[in-house]
Amino acid sequence: MAFSSYILTAFPASGARIPPYFHNTDHRQRCLTQLRSKHTGLEKYIFLNGLKERDPNLFYEVLLSNMLEIIPILYTPTVGDACSNYSHIWRRPEGLYVSIESKGHIRQILSTWPAGAAGRIAVVTDGSRILGLGDLGANGLPISIGKLDLYIAGAGIKPSTTVPICLDLGTNTEKFLNDPLYLGVRRRRPDTAEMDEFMKEFMAAMRDVFPQLLVQFEDFSTDNAFRYLDLFRNQYRCFNDDIQGTGSVVLSGFLNAARLATADAGTPLSDQRILFFGAGSAGIGVAKQLTSFFTLLGLSEEEARQRIWTVDSKGLITADRKGLQEHKKYFARTDYQGPPLTSLIDIVKYVKPTALLGLSTIRNAFSEDVVRLMGSLNTRPIIFPLSNPISLCELDYSDAIHWTNGSVIFASGSPYKPVEFEGRVYEPGQGNNMYIFPGIGLGTILSKARHVTDSMVEQASIALASALTEDEQSADLIYPRLTRIRDISAKIALAVIRAAQKDNVDENTLFRNMSDEALLEYVGAKQWQPPSTHNVPRL
Ligand SMILES: NC(=O)c1ccc[n+]([C@@H]2O[C@H](COP(=O)([O-])OP(=O)(O)OC[C@H]3O[C@@H](n4cnc5c(N)ncnc54)[C@H](O)[C@@H]3O)[C@@H](O)[C@H]2O)c1
Ligand SMILES: O=C(O)C[C@H](O)C(=O)O
Ligand SMILES: [Mg+2]
């Protein structure tokens, strides 16, 4: 709906109440000025939320033309504040809550969603590990909404086909249970048996109500993230963003980073030694995906595994450790003899990594001595502090540049600003799954892939890595600039569709005979654009 017709619908007989020169002004600019007048990120988030409610098309138009400014508000880092405070800032219903108390009649709850069978993509969280902020319970909904805004802005998914969902299964965070304004059910989280029953009913009901839906699991605590991905990935059209999306985006950045590092050092690409600090769903998801970096170069799975080391809160993960969680076993080292290695600096001295990746939620864990050591071991050290939001990031960009004299190849999970050092401006990368999931979603939806296969995720990664322009390459970037995300998502979608075809999971086989060029054009044409509002001033 154009803005002027929106005004007339929202305020019948408002003709005379619209200021006489309103149409001579650019209302998008007015919105931006109002946004910029807010002092805190949370106030900006609340303002944007109100704008979206008043006029969704205008909201998306403003978002699309100001992505660099607005994405960090709707998404990491500010969405972290929005989640932490959601029970207090809540203003209106904007997503679907499915409560554990609805077990037995989940289908009826899902059927209340207005778009019904039109739903194509749902982001589902249970709020148990929102970013690195822990168990936020029913406050987790904004993460689903923020991801879907990226689907809309970044891939051109039609807003009315998106379904943001928060599963309200209780919380183990005492503070919320004692907060009179807390919006969720007041109970602790269920045990595995009760949660399994709930999840199985939920997924079956989702398919009944939304037959064409792709489900993105988001920010489930690590054990459940792996558990439900394993349980459902061959049965439903679904994927886990923290495991697979993050794996894919980091592989992509790593392909470009390793090329840069080895070109400068004159060493073989396959000589990479990768150290993971943090071994949860994200750390292990990325580590598994990074084995493809080596297998794509012709190494065996076993050789790839040997080039990866993992660290958790107890130190270097070794196979002899008692009670090791299942997901940590694959990368547990069998070749380390000696007392447990617990401090990061000792681990770096022992491993001599070419790359250090952080998915630990520990702020500033990459201390000056660690970063300087990485700089002395490598001509171009690869350091990716990937924990979100920024308040939990392992290393600030400015420190990374200063402590390595500008030699670092850097990507963080949340955005940093460029840094000037000794007369040169350095641009950070953002290694965030937001570059990948919109394209994976778009490709999966268009091809109606029955499942999201490993090769769809891997090809998405390669497509992203190959999307750098000459200009971006000459600036030493490892990810494309975010302003190009729509084009990039279309290219990723193309790669995902081709992989779905190879794996024979594409229910829509119409694209099989189309050339890449024609298919890319088709995908681009499918991307939703907000209908332009009244914005061109009539002067
Ligand atoms: N950049 C991205 O796109 C992206 C994607 C997904 C997750 N993440 C971020 O990754 C982080 C981790 O997510 P997760 O789901 O794996 O969480 P998690 O809680 O399961 O994992 C955290 C890991 O860090 C380890 N750890 C904790 N304290 C430590 C310490 N003092 N020293 C060493 N290791 C320590 C834990 O043992 C665990 O293995 C979060 O901050 C999340 O926001 C980023
Ligand atoms: O949400 C993000 O910014 C990335 C990722 O999914 C995370 O959990 O941190
Ligand atoms: Mg996440």
Image (cartoon, helix red, strand yellow):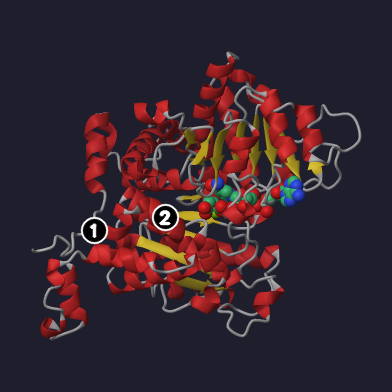
* Mark 2: few/some/many CA within 10 Å (<14, 14-19, 20+): many
Q: Position of residue 452 (x, y in %)?
A: 46, 43
Residue drawn at the location 64% of the way across and 46% of the way down: 359
In the rendered image of this protein, does residue 260 appear above or below residue 439? above
Residue 20, located in which quarter of the rendered image?
bottom left
Question: Residue 527, percent across and down?
Answer: 26, 49
Q: Which mark is residue 179?
A: none
- Rounded to the nearest angstrom, the CA distance separating label 1 from label 2 is 17 Å
Which kind of residue does numbered mark 2 sit on?
Ile
Q: Is mark 1 within 8 Å of ligand 2?
A: no
For this view, does 88 lie left or right of residue 129? left
Q: Amino acid at mark 1?
A: Pro
Secondary structure under the numbered disc 1 in the rendered image? loop
Q: Residue at x 31, y 46 (%)?
A: 446
* Percent x, y of residue 492: 38, 38
Q: Residues within 10 Å of mark 1 (few under 14, many from 20)?
A: many
Q: Which residue is mark 2?
A: 71
Residue 530's tag is 1
For residue 264, side relative to residue 491 (left or right): right
